[in-house]
């Protein structure tokens, strides 16, 4: 399923819940069950991380998840096998979040082809600046895969324009400076940043969001989607009733993705 189709399917007052987990944490079989729990809980898009040994945009929680996944044997070949085994079971888009070293090593064209063939609808590469993205952008366009680029609180007007021109699927709006990880507050200027991004592409806010109240505030600020990762990864790391807790938590977050809260 294409990302644009999912956003088109949402109600006018509804934002997408985009849920991140790291593939292979704690095992490939567990990942299948985790994804199933997220979908049952109401996740609209699954951001499935391809673990890298030096995840520079990620905080301690997702760094630890990447380490666990790599130690469990996860690699690009197994990643695409895993995605192929689950993507056709759920009518939602899957997005690959990874780092450019893995794409470069595999070969940009082959990597994107493998994404398309396995059921990946979009890719997020935090360490790839828009100025260096032509090769990946061209490969994505050829293979009908969305390239999702990042806008931060300090991205200037001209660079925002470049990012929106290269992006498709949705724009990844970083709520605050720093790395991923749960935070007690979200940058107060998130709403201002959303207004500054003049684009018809859906805008999804991530980094630091981990409570239903934060999801509510981000949606009320004008976001079309909310990205939650570390909160789910913390549940996985606890190894305590993982699947039921993830489903319940996803449902709580999704219930706060409606502006008028008429759904439950």
Image (cartoon, rainbow, N blue to C red):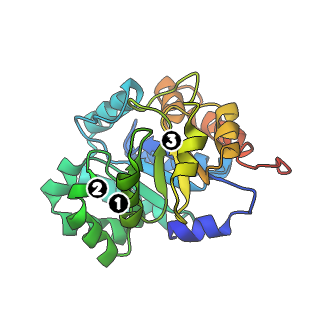
Labels in figure, total: 3
Label 3 – label 1 distance at C-alpha: 20 Å
Among the 4 quarters of the image, the one containing residue 131: bottom left
In the displayed orientation, state which residue is furthest to the front: 157
Residue beneath disc 2 = 130
Residue closer to the observer: 173 or 180: 173
Q: Mark 3 or mark 2, which has the lower sequence index?
A: 2
What residue is shown at x 37% (from left), y 43% (from top)? 24
Q: Is there a contact, CB below 8 Å, between mark 2 and mark 1?
A: yes
Picture layout, residue 43 above or below residue 69: below
Secondary structure under tag 2 reads helix
How far from the left and from the top, in percent, is residue 220?
71, 44
Residue beneath disc 1 = 162
Whether residue 245 is visible, yes or no, is yes
Residue beneath disc 3 = 206
In the displayed orientation, state which residue is furthest to the right: 262
Query: Within 10 angstroms of label 2, few (less than 14), some, or many (20 or more) residues?
Result: some
């Amino acid at each position: 399923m294409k990302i644009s189709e999912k956003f088109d399917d949402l109600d006018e007052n509804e934002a997408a819940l985009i849920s991140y987990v790291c593939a292979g944490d704690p095992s490939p079989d567990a990942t299948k069950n985790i994804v199933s729990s997220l979908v049952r809980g109401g996740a609209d898009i699954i951001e499935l991380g391809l673990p890298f040994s030096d995840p520079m945009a990620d905080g301690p929680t997702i760094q630890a998840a990447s380490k666990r996944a790599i130690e469990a044997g996860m690699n690009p070949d197994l990643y695409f096998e895993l995605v192929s085994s689950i993507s056709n079971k759920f009518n939602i888009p899957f997005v690959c979040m990874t780092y450019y070293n893995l794409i470069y090593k595999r070969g940009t064209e082959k990597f994107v082809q493998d994404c398309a063939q396995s059921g990946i609808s979009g890719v997020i590469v935090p360490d790839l600046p828009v100025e260096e993205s032509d090769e990946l952008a061209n490969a994505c366009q050829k293979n009908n895969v969305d390239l999702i680029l990042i806008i931060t609180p300090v991205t200037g007007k001209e660079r925002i324009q470049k990012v929106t021109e290269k992006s498709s699927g949705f724009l990844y709006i970083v709520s605050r400076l720093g790395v991923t990880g749960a935070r007690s507050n979200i940058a107060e200027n998130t709403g201002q940043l959303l207004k500054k991004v003049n684009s018809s592409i859906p805008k999804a806010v991530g980094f630091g969001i981990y409570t239903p109240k934060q999801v509510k505030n981000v949606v009320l600020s004008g976001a079309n989607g909310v990205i939650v990762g570390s909160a789910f990864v913390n549940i996985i790391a606890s190894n305590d009733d993982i699947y039921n807790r993830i489903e319940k938590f996803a449902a709580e977050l999704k219930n706060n993705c409606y502006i008028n809260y008429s759904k439950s």
